[in-house]
Amino acid sequence: MILLCSIPKAGINTPSLALGYLSGACKEQGIDVALRDFNLDLWEQTIHGKWWEMWKESDTTLYKGLNFTKFVKEYYGEVLDGWAKEIADHEAEWVGISCFSYRSLPTLKLLVPLIRALAPNKKIIVGGAPIPTYAEWIKKNNLADYIIVGEGDIILPRIINENLSPGIMHVEQIDDLDALPIPDYDGIDFTKYTPGDPGGLYMRDKPVIKPIEAGIMGSRGCVRKCTFCDVEHYWPKFRWRSAANIYSEMMRLYNTGVREIYFYDSLMNGNQNEFEALLDIIIADGSRFNSIKGLAIFKQQPKRLYAKMEKACIKQLSIGVESFSEPMRTSMRKMFSNEIMEENIANYQECNIELVLLMVIGYPSEMEHHHKENLKWINDHAHMSKSNPIRRIEIGGTMLILPGAPVFKNTMFDFYTDENNDWVVKNEDEYNTHDVRTRRREETEDVCRRNGFMTGSVYGSGGVMIGDHERGSVDYMRPQDKLIPLRIETLNFESDDVGWESDPTRASHQNL
């Protein structure tokens, strides 16, 4: 038997997809499975108490800096002790731990030694999005017996059934996603999750009657290679499931009471033919679901597709605009023009489909005139606020340099750090610093609100991590006074002040 666990920090609007998909894969190979969502446990224990703000998108309490140290000493340490004891007492010989993002790594680092002390014979398997970057570090610190770099659907059952040798397991991408079993969430109570709000913050006001929402992954990877994103680092090739295969999963969820679906693909319309085929199946079967949401891209699409989306109950799409400046998007490899964007938005408006527009504030080559283009576009489109059709403009945090993203691993920019270990780039006579990025974020948020656009986060604490988290007003020296090349080995990127999302110079990052 294997106990599959999800650990903080991740959203709590749907159960972890990793638990469902890996459970289905193991059960198909005759392996008994138990599921445990410790991330949801922590949310339930803290959302109405002192530490509730940790569930805000930009809060660092669960993974970084002095806030994390204080949280562990005052509260989290005892929680981790309890989780470790529960895992140690469980009958399962194998323990699978899913790390949703880099933000899960501090919990992994603290939890695993506790498990090993109580149950040294348990075999621990770790996987997830940050593993390709941190596999060597996990091995060095004995935080897992098996470290899966890549997709776990096939290798996880093999590890258990074939008793493979421990170590780092580099896995080839799975080409035929239709061959994978349907996810199995047996043991998960869907009613405990908070549809529409990854942070579950609205539950602080008063409990509400919630619909039941589930997530689906209809494709893996992305057709685009945006420079700020690290999806290509662990999913180099875009693959998709057939429409019939996806709908079979949707109906399995429907038969358990699910009426709301969220597609966690990088983009639902990456394969337009298969996407349209899925819409046709949904419509032909009576459009049973109350709401279908997901992520998409702006692209040239036939008019009929928008009408079909409306008939199929596609209620909301989150689309990565990143910048309303076309030259800035071109440098990001976004591959769509302002003309295409405006045309898409008008068609979505006509078909009553809400949009959440996602932005990146402070891209390395962003200059003040690009920022002003953003503000002008928002001002000029105020008539589209209040869900007509723009539900909100998601500005998140500010630009984070991910180790697996092309902006870093392809040395696209000359990065420096200042005395506060924040990244700096010089563009002509302008410096892109943390205080500049924070100011632009605040100005963008202010313009959004004055024009009636909501700015709440669609990602909660997970998803695409765009943002080095605001620290309030920091008194910076001039960035040109103390610039240090980012690759200097003397910088301590594992210090409490810097944290887990800002350490690309560590040895484990040098061979990306």
Image (cartoon, helix red, strand yellow):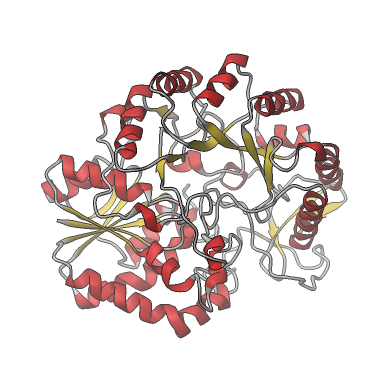
Name the side, left or right, on which 16 lies relative to 414. left
Instruction: Establish if 242 lies above or below 257.
Output: above
The part of the image, by quadrant, that contains residue 493 is bottom right
Spot occupied by residue 327 in the image (x, y as percentages of width and height): 77, 33
Q: Is residue 152 visible?
A: no
Instruction: Establish if 96 lies above or below 227.
Output: below
Name the side, left or right, on which 360 lies relative to 305. right
Q: Residue at x 45, y 30 (%)?
A: 238
Query: Who is closer to the viewer here, 317 or 106?
Result: 317
Name the side, left or right, on which 81 lies relative to 474. left
The part of the image, by quadrant, that contains residue 152 is top left
Spot occupied by residue 438 in the image (x, y as percentages of width and height): 75, 60
Instruction: Establish if 274 lies above or below 478.
Output: above
Spot occupied by residue 391 in the image (x, y as percentages of width and height): 67, 42
Query: Who is closer to the viewer here, 317 or 271?
Result: 317
Q: Residue at x 24, y 40 (%)?
A: 154
Name the side, left or right, on which 80 lies relative to 181. right
